[in-house]
């Protein structure tokens, strides 16, 4: 995190004020994006898109796999390192190409249009819309704390014996998705204002959780986790609830076997288990790249985009690590592992303040999920707009509203698909499937940084990636290691994700062929 803040200070002092040029596909007569978001709004998109419901829930599953307080903190430190390196690397690309579409544009310009399309295809199919649906349903679940009739099991319309249909929780998700989509069609300034308010509120919620830990420390209150997690058990290893960790004898390193294991075996097993649990921590910290999608609407993007990436990721990850330390201070490891419905933050607040604390935490998560949905709706629509401008998506999606200067059709198309995913009951599975694919696209994008340094050495770079080439290369190595581990130990999360990405290849062929036919007809 220190790297982020040092970088932010340097960037704020060095890079002069500049304005973004319009995208190369817009004509002089066409409506253009309004640069209505400053540094605070851009940073709010970074933070608001990152903070959803994950930080309040995923530590339960991570702790069940790890079984060690030290490794739980280590997992979040790995996440922090990777996310910060990724954000600092994207800063160069964002300052170099401050155009609507962000990561889609970076892939298109560095590796070719097919890679940009495959990213945009996967983003629309599930990464963005699936996350919107999942976070929206999480909103409905926590709304049930205050209104018991709102539940995933309270069906208004049900198909078969599965989860397909309309429950009251799904209905709540659809209502907020439609409401926030409509809000964002009213103009980027209104959408940004909503994001600013709710991001500030969710940061205050995280600070409230951290405040519980501070209270325990200064008031010398009895935190059940302090003695059990920060004593001799802090450095405990295993037993791990995951199949496949083998010693050089082809046997498991289980409980009681660590003293007989070699240093190489211990290091390898720790590296593998930390990679596996990144499924939870990395993707609780994901979506920081969403701000790059909105580059066309950010004031002075060549300065504010890299700054917002550094500041937003640095602050959020610092809060995340502090929250995990509080969880370990208040609850014993067993309490974290068995938190009801994995709601660790709620269990912490209940332990500190009783039922009132639990309700406060539920309200905080409602605010957090509401703001997360807004940020992802605002940002995602800009990618489909950029794809349409390149002739790789529906033509109507590539138009801006004359009055509000927002991609209204893109917003509503995204809304419809996200709502259908809410009804499908499969949004959670789809998200699991693309975890691997998301990491692959991060690797490709950061790899594109190396390509552009070679192919466009004279291109203006208002900011150059801190630590290049060492830090970007380190990210690529770490991400490839995680991908390899997931391929080996969690194939159910990897191969389906690759299939979803590869399904975009015939779609790309159809779109490019269609675009060529249109061009020939015009000529």
Image (cartoon, helix red, strand yellow):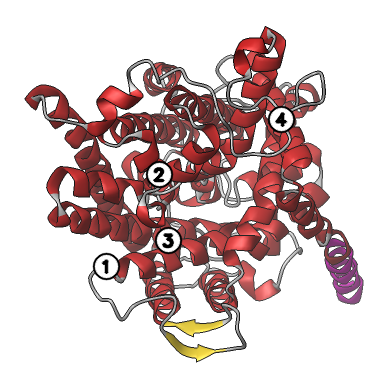
Q: Are marks 3 and 1 in contact (CB under 8 Å)?
A: no
Location of residue 355 (image quadrant): bottom left
Which comes sooner in the sequence, label 3 or label 4? 4
Q: Where is residue 276? Give x, y as percent.
A: 63, 36
In screen coordinates, is 365 left or right of 8? left
Label 1: element kind: loop
Residue 519 counted in the magenta span: yes
Q: Quadrant of the N terminus?
A: top left
Graded by Cα atoms within 10 Å as few (under 14), some (14 to 19) or many (20 or more), the crowding at tag 1 reads: some
Residue that mark 1 sits on: 145
Which comes sooner in the sequence, label 3 or label 2? 2
Residues under labels 3 and 4: Cα distance? 37 Å
Residue stretch rendered in magenta on the structure: 508-523
Q: Where is residue 450? Give x, y as percent.
A: 74, 24
Q: Nearer the viewer, mark 1 or mark 4?
A: 4
In this rendering, the answer to whether 334 lies above or below 2 is below
Q: Residue furthest front?
A: 256
Label 3: element kind: helix
Residue 346 counted in the magenta span: no
Task: Answer yes or no: is residue 475 visible.
Answer: no
Residues under labels 3 and 1: Cα distance? 20 Å
Residue that mark 3 sits on: 373
């Amino acid at each position: 995190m220190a790297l982020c803040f040092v970088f932010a200070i340097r960037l704020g002092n060095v890079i002069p004020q500049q304005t973004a040029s319009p995208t190369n596909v817009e004509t002089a007569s066409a409506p253009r994006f309004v640069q209505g978001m400053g540094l605070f709004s851009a940073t709010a998109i970074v933070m608001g898109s990152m903070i959803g419901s994950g930080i309040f829930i995923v530590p339960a599953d991570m702790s069940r796999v790890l079984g060690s307080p030290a490794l739980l903190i280590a997992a979040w430190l790995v996440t922090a390192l990777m996310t910060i390196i990724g954000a600092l690397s994207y800063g160069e690309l964002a300052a170099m190409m401050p155009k609507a579409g962000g990561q889609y544009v970076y892939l298109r310009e560095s590796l070719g249009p097919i890679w940009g399309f495959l990213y945009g295809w996967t983003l629309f199919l599930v990464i963005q819309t699936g996350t919107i649906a999942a976070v929206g349903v999480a909103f409905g679940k926590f709304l049930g704390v205050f209104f018991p009739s709102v539940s995933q099991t309270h069906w208004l319309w049900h198909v078969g014996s599965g989860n397909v249909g309309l429950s009251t929780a799904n209905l709540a998700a659809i209502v907020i998705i439609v409401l926030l989509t409509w809000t964002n069609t009213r103009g980027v300034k209104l959408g940004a204002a909503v994001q600013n308010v709710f991001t500030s509120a969710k940061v205050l919620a995280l600070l409230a959780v951290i405040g519980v830990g501070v209270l325990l420390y200064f008031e010398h209150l009895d935190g059940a986790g302090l003695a059990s997690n920060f004593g001799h058990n802090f450095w405990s290893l295993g037993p791990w609830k995951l199949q496949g960790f083998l010693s050089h004898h082809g046997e498991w390193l289980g409980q009681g076997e660590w003293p007989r294991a070699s240093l190489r075996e211990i290091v390898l097993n720790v590296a593998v288990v930390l990679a596996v649990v990144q499924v939870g921590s990395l993707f609780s910290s994901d979506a920081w790249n969403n701000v790059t999608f909105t580059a066309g609407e950010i004031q002075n993007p060549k300065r504010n985009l890299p700054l917002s990436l550094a500041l937003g990721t640095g602050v959020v990850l610092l809060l995340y690590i502090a929250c995990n330390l509080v969880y370990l201070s208040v609850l014993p490891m067993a309490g974290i592992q068995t938190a009801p419905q994995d709601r660790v933050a709620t269990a912490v607040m209940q332990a500190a303040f009783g039922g009132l604390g639990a309700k406060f935490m539920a309200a905080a998560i409602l605010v957090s999920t509401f703001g997360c949905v807004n940020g992802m709706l605002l940002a995602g629509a800009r990618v489909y707009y950029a794809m349409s401008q390149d002739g790789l998506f529906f033509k109507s999606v590539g138009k801006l509203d004359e009055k509000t200067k927002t991609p209204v059709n893109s917003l509503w198309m995204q809304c419809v698909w996200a709502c259908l995913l809410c009804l499908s009951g499969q949004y959670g599975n789809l998200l699991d499937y693309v975890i691997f694919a998301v990491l692959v696209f991060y690797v490709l994008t950061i790899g594109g940084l190396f390509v552009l340094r070679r192919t466009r050495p004279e291109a203006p770079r208002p900011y150059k990636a801190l630590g290049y080439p060492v830090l970007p290369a380190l990210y690529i190595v770490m991400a490839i290691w995680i991908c390899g581990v997931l391929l080996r130990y969690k194939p159910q999360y990897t191969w389906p994700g690759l299939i979803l990405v590869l399904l975009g290849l015939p779609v790309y062929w159809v779109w490019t062929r269609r675009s060529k036919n249109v061009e020939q007809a015009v000529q």
